[in-house]
Amino acid sequence: MFIMENLNRPSWDEYFMKLAWLVAERSTCLRHHVGAVMVKDRRILTTGYNGAAAGVKDCLKLGCLRDALKIPSGQRHEICRAIHAEQNAIIQGGFQGVNIKGSTLYCTHSPCALCAKMIVNAGVKKVVVGNIYPDNFYKELFSEAGVEYSYLTIKNLVICQKE
C-alpha cells in the first residue's frame, strides 16, 4: 500500500483552477495561454482554450496577427485568429448538448468584454479567475447581472507565456 505523507489536498476551487491551467497548455496563441473549465455540482461540464477555429490555420503556423499589427492586450479583440477559452467552453456546451446554466467557470484569466457578455447570457452563476486581463468591463457587468466572481492564485504554479 502506498501512503502519501503530508498530503496537501487542494480545495475544489484549487483543483478546478489547476485543471484550467492544464487545459491552457493546448492553446495555440503566442501571447497568452488561457484555459477554462465549466463545472456544476463539482462535475466538469466542458473545457476550452484559446485557439483558431477548428480546421483553420492557427498562430503557431501563421504568426500572431495582433503582434504584426502592434495591438496591445485588452484592445480590439475582434482582430485575432483565436476564439477565447471562455467562448470555446460555452460553445462546447452547445455542441455537446450540455446545459451550462448555473455553472461555475474557472478561467486562467479574467474575461474580456465579449466573453463577459457571453458568460452572462449563458447563465453562468460564478466565475473564478487566476490572472487579471487588462479589460475591467466584466466587473460592472457581472455585478449588475448577479454573476459572482473571485480571484484565485495557485501557489508554486509555473506559467510560461510570451510577455
Image (spheres, grey):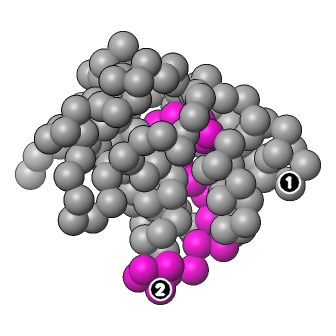
Quadrant of the rendered image containing residue 20:
top left
Q: Amino acid at mark 2?
A: Gly
Name the kind of residue labelled 1 in the image.
Gly
- Mark found first going from the N terminus, 2 or 1: 2
Callouts 2 and 1 close, C-beta under 8 Å: no
Provide residue 102's location: percent of width, then percent of height. 69, 69
How far from the left and from the top, in percent, is residue 130? Answer: 52, 31
Q: Give residue 97's mark.
A: 2
| Residue assigned mark 1 | 146
Residue span colored magenta: 94-112
- Front-most of 19 and 31? 31
Residue at the (42%, 80%) spot, across then down: 95
Helix, strand or loop at mark 2 = loop
**Residue at position x 31%, y 37% in the image:** 29
> Does the magenta segment cover residue 104?
yes
SS at badge 1? loop
Foreground of the two, 27 or 79 = 79
